[in-house]
Image (tube, rainbow, N blue to C red):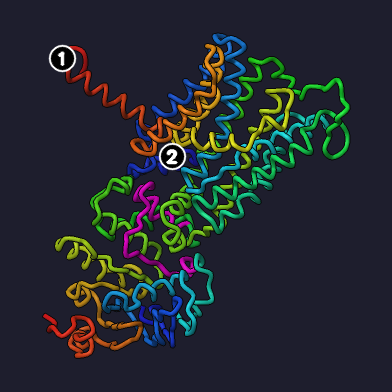
Amino acid sequence: MAGTAVRTARARPRPPLQKPGAGTLTRAAVVAVILLISLFALPELLSLYYVDAMTQVAVYAMVTLGLGLLVGRVGLVSLGQVAVLAIGAWTAARLLFATTLPYPVVLLAAGVVTMALGTLIGLPALRLRGLYLALITLMLAGAITVVLATANFPNGGHGFLGYDASSVHIPPIRRPSIAASDPAYFRYSVIVAALMFLLAGVHIKTRPGRAWAAIRQSEPAALAAGINVTLYKLWAFALASFITGVAGGVLAGAVHYLYSIGFPTQDSITLLAVVLMGGAYSLWGAVVAALLLQLLPAGLHNWGVSADWLTILFGLGVLQVLTTAPGGLADQVPKDLARLGRLLRRHLPSGAGG
Amino acid sequence: MDSERGVIEVTGLTVRFGGVTSLDGMTVTFAAGTCGLIGPNGAGKTTFFNVLSGFVRPAAGSVLAFGDDLLAMVHFRRARWGVRRTFQTEQAIEDLTVFDNVAMVHEHAGLGSASRRQDVLDAIAFVGLEAGPAARVGTLAAGQRRLVEVARAVVGRPKLVLLDEPAAGLPDEETAHLGDVIRGIPEQTGGLTILVDHDMSLVSACCETTAVLDFGKLIASGPTAEVLRDERVVRAYLGTAELA
């Protein structure tokens, strides 16, 4: 009887709002296919060089996801995300050397610690916006870089810092036992990244996402709607920092050895550039940004071209995005493809398309 | 019903921005239904709304709303208490759907989630929006966005609805529709509405009583028809020309 009641309740006619539209289903299918290809086909098809590069893409997709949330959803520009990533990596490395905790627990802990510190970095966001916030986060990131250069990353030493300058045989940072090989660790990274995208997606689709959209467009309108602007801005920083901290944890296992010179302050600027190029307003944009940031240099290096050219390319890319395609590549490329399709249909013989 | 409507008592409200006195000892009572608030540009109308919203801290004065000290509340908490508003430059959130625009207010105003869906759809139906609830606000025309803003302002039976020039820039037929909507707000919400607008025919059609500000001072208040005939109002508002 209870079953019938439930079925009747579900059968009640509803306005079209809650029915998953064709678009939603297509999107879910595309995500599933990409995930399956990443998990099963890519590690088989790619050389180890590119498997490692794709692991970096998975890591940096989380970092660009976090920055995209701040910039695209809430309108907060942070130029300190690479330092936030370093905090996550440091925390994970320290825990991995000091404890035998399972890897997911370490990732979670790295996320939580980074969340706490990253939210502190976000405190100026309560008073500042735009250029000034960018400047302050850049300064804080610079300060963190200086601290890291002094403290160094843990290398199996003792004490709080876990760094031993006299170590000769530095043990590698461990990986989860189920993902010790490079292809397996790539799969592991993709799954963690997918979970982080899911976490961000759920936020965007629900109460915080609506609050962020309001804050981004107009703080007075958000306040008048009863939104605690302070809380939701800090929430955005907390979520972005958590995701970036988890990315740091995945990065620690990916590279085995961490050095403070690996997290230069200026990388945060490049990070913002690729996030804008990829598209700060969509989750796909974060993936595109990570591909630009990690796969492109790996490819260029492999072909013997200096990756320094990318600075120029990214500069031109940002210019192009800011002037003609504010939605970034993730928004523009599908539009351009659709336009191309229409153009082809119009000019090709009638049999070629409907 | 009338006992629920209550009153907004404003006493000696003064706001200064640097050397400029934007509101100068404003004392007025908004009694019930829909009240007009008119005055020339720069008279302090929007400043008054900003005080009620908590965006501006007055130098002196008090606002008692239904017996509660409104100025003592943190700005974002006032929506929960029951203040809603629209803005002179319309602020419907472009990235959200019509439904989410209205639901956003509902969920932050501390209203239960059980009735949310129905309340939101009621508010959207009330303003007579042509677009469906699933339409993205960024795709809507100006008049439709205004209505989304009004729907946000009336959802969940607020106590005080502030409308800041809702008809600005709208063509006549849309203004007429908006007038119908505004006249329906007291019944829809059971609360009090204050309407700021320069369109005197809209104010006459919607408001039983009207207050007039000029240079931050209240120069008249009372039944709308009388106020609009008041010589001081005519002089302040239209210079020496006659009110049509």
Image label count? 2
**Could you tell me the amino acid type at mark 2?**
Tyr
Relative side of A190 to B140, left or right: right
For this rendering, which residue is in front, A1 or B22? B22
Q: Marks 2/1: CA distance?
A: 37 Å
Circle 1: is it few (<14), some (14-19), or many (20+) Cα within 10 Å?
few
According to the picture, the residue beneath numbered tag 2 turns out to be: A281
The residue under the point 48% across, 23% down is A32
Kindly report which numbered mark, 2 or 1, lies closer to the viewer in this rendering. Answer: 2
Residue B106: in magenta span:
yes
Q: Which comes before the other along the chain, label 2 or label 1?
A: 2
The residue under the point 71% across, 43% down is A113
Q: Using the rendered view, name the quadrant where residue A155 is placed.
A: top right
Q: Which residue range is magenta in the image?
A: B78-107
**Residue B223 seen in render:** yes
Relative side of A145 to A26, left or right: right
**Residue A105 seen in render:** no
According to the picture, the residue beneath numbered tag 1 turns out to be: A350
**Tag 1 subunit:** A
Where A286 falls versus A6 (above or below)? above
| Cβ atoms under marks 2 and 1 closer than 8 Å | no
Q: Position of residue A319 (x, y in %)?
A: 40, 35
The residue under the point 73% across, 29% down is A259
Residue B4: in magenta span:
no
**Same chain for the residues at labels 2 and 1, yes or no?**
yes
Where A154 falls versus B111 (above or below)? above
**Could you tell me the amino acid type at mark 1?**
Ser
Q: Using the rendered view, name the quadrant where residue B32 is placed.
A: bottom left
Where disc 1 sits, the SS reads helix
Circle 2: is it few (<14), some (14-19), or many (20+) Cα within 10 Å?
many
Where B117 falls versus B85 (above or below)? above
Q: Position of residue B118 (x, y in %)?
A: 38, 55
